[in-house]
Image (spheres, grey):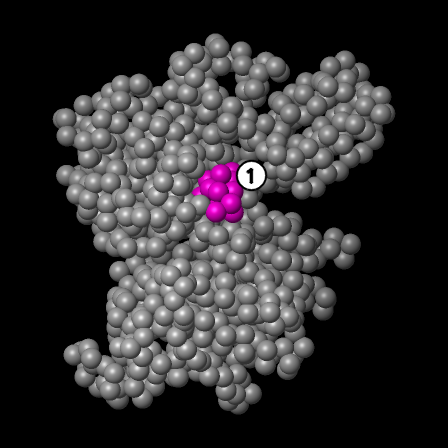
Amino acid sequence: MTLKIYAYGIVQGVGFRPLVYHMAKNEGISGTVRNVGGYVEIIAQGEKGAVGRFLTVLTETKDMGYEIIKFEKEEISPLALNDFVILKSGALGESSVIPPDLPVCPACQKELLNGGDRRFGNPFISCISCGPRYTIMERLPYDRDHTAMIDFKMCEECEKEYTSPESRRFHAQTISCNDCGPYLIYRDKKKEEKEWLEGEALDQAAAALLEGGILAVKGIGGYHLVCSPFREDTVNRLRILKGREEKPFAVMFSSIAEIKKYCHVSKEERSLLESRPRPIVLLRREGDYMAPSTNKGSMYCGAFLPYTPLQILLTEKLGPLIMTSANISGQPIIREDEPMLSLSSKELRGVLYNHRRILRSVDDSVAKIVDGKPQLIRRSRGYVPYPVFLATEVKESHGEKEPSVFAAGGDLKASFCFYKNGSAVVSQYFGDLEESKVMEEYERSFEDMKKLFRFQPELVVCDLHPNYHSARYASSLGLPLIKVQHHHAHIASVMAEHHLEGPVIGVAMDGTGYGTDGTIWGGEFLICQDKECKRAGHLSPFPILGGDQSMREAWKTAICCLIHFGLQEYITDERSDLIKAALRHHINVVSSSSAGRLFDAASSVLLIAHENTYEGECASLFEKSGLSAMERQIKPASVPFEVSERKGIWELDPKSAFAALCKERGKENISALALGFHIGFAKGIVSICEKLKDQYKISDVCLSGGVFQNTVLTEHAARFLREKGFKVYMNLSVPPNDGGISLGQVYLGRKYLKAFYQTK
């Protein structure tokens, strides 16, 4: 029999065609395989049983790097075929699922460290199973001529491997060796810009790091700033260089065994560290072995394993290294050589780079284990552009093809999302769109991904906030536009991931979101079904000064809360008179139900932290205090939240909780009070969910929003909810913070489209 087969999914850039070749040869199948833009086309001709076995192996093989999402086949007339060959790529069709950048595979790592191998010590070693993909891909189909590797001519030996079916590098588009491809360059800014090449470059760079220098090292998605995590003077100079005063730095380790010297690593955390995306994983620190300025008092160490050959070589030579994105705080990561080489700073010792172009900036991803499962904090390298798969809303049988959707996301932790034919591709993390350079990168990436995926949006979805830069950009596209409420999008992102239609109880807890009533929301209980949303409960509103500016000054929010709750006698801050006057005269006063600001205020009331020098700092230190009580088995203090009903809406009132914090902070252990606040808040969430369950007969609960990055709160809330018979859903494929709301916007945009087509 002769079959024509179409394989859709992650089938380009992962060595799929060579694997198909070997599978066919093993079964005595004749035919061809080729990339055709958005899919791989296979012709398979042979004895019927052999073709059947070939199909079984092709569709059931796991852990080989590829993933078939859709598989179509048709029987055709026999062809004059005597062998199985890989053909030149065909014409462009619809976009494929483009693979993320892949970490060094075990086979390449073994060759890298084998003194007898011809690729020994090669910082760009790769094969069909590993190496950069998304960040070097110019266009589809995935061939060497369509990547940044076109700049490097293969040597004779590499050419032989590339064309040999028996080679591990048969059709490996990133193939290179010590005689061809990119080569390493080290420029020392302290030695009159002197440069070294290849092995000397690595040795000189390692020596500079050992001397306490700070280097810029070119990676896959941009440059890193690299230095020792053990030298306080060096780490402080790194903070000066980055303009980053307090936020902890990520540290790269050579192995799991090395990580365990400094951090606790559970089975789940090890699995996450070793997973293909190689994210930074937030691990509980054990001991204070590193320089104090490396972690800045955080309970976590952001640990990760090497994912490039160069990183392996550096950590093998030097041990743990701070490996943080090379950007001035708040700006995009630097990916081009010239800006990095021309950066003028006495703090930067040198630049370790190469001439392979990085076509798009992609920062490291960040994750941790919460409730026994991975939770993404920042979704970027290793995950992007792998899609979230959704069921199509408009069937072609209706005579309509589902329109493509662009969702603009939010402004903080910005990312956008493209949706087409069941695939939702969430972009890499960009940062805060308030920064003009970040906004420029966001706009550039929109055009880049639109071209790469051959995507033409027909509907645009954005946030309801009238002043969001993302919403303004969405409006500027001149396409049909839908605006959705921020917290509704948070809950919709969970529904999208878990294929939920509703009704569900949505608990959205974050810092800021523009409400449908024009106030700042942030502690919301929603009833969500399909595209509909009802606000059924919320945190009792309290006044804050400065609106979005309140995010930095926790002490100011604490004073506002204590005044509002009638606890003025517990205010000791000498700046309180100005706050009182502003509240009395309603100067720059905004009503808010923000859970994020409430946690900031509680942190300040307990004298744990008073100012966010980076987003979430006060809440993070507050969480650390609660976790400390758990680890030391300190009994949590009683910090109750009250539940009431007002005009048919349930309210979670923190007044009694703040009264407990104020009255007991001089008597109770601070950690016990912090833990009590977390538990009291979690119980309050459950109490309102129980009211809503009775009222609406719903037992599915979706938790989302940046506050649910708090492990203590999330794990208590999830456990208490399950004990009461609720089924709990959380974000897994996208972050619970604003980095995930574009997926929720896509979900809701598609629901509006479905309703539109149903009424036609």
The residue under the point 52% across, 83% down is: 650
Is 566 on the left-hand or right-hand side of 718? left
Image quadrant in which you'd find residue 636: bottom left
Q: Is 36 located above or below residue 464 in the figure?
A: above
The residue under the point 57% across, 76% down is: 689
Asked if residue 479 can be seen in this view, the reply is no
Residue 658 coordinates in the image, percent (x, y): 35, 80
Quadrant occupied by the C terminus: bottom right
Residue 465 coordinates in the image, percent (x, y): 43, 69
Q: Is 696 located above or below residue 109 in the figure?
A: below
Is 112 on the left-hand or right-hand side of 568? right
Residue 640 coordinates in the image, percent (x, y): 43, 80
Frontmost residue, 129 versus 489: 129
Q: Is 611 located above or below residue 442 in the figure?
A: below
Asked if residue 69 can be seen in this view, the reply is yes
Q: Is 754 located above or below residue 231 in the figure?
A: below
Q: Secondary structure at mark 1?
A: loop
Is 98 covered by the magenta stretch?
no
The residue under the point 29% across, 30% down is: 318
Number of numbered discs: 1
As shown in the figure, which amino acid type bears the numbered disc 1?
A: Ile
Residue 701 coordinates in the image, percent (x, y): 59, 68
Frontmost residue, 607 versus 754: 607
Quadrant occupied by the N terminus: top right
Is 498 on the left-hand or right-hand side of 213? right
The residue under the point 73% across, 55% down is: 395
What is the span of residues highlighted in magenta in the rendered image?
Answer: 266-279
Image quadrant in which you'd find residue 49: top right
Disc 1 designates what residue?
98
Frontmost residue, 409 versus 382: 382
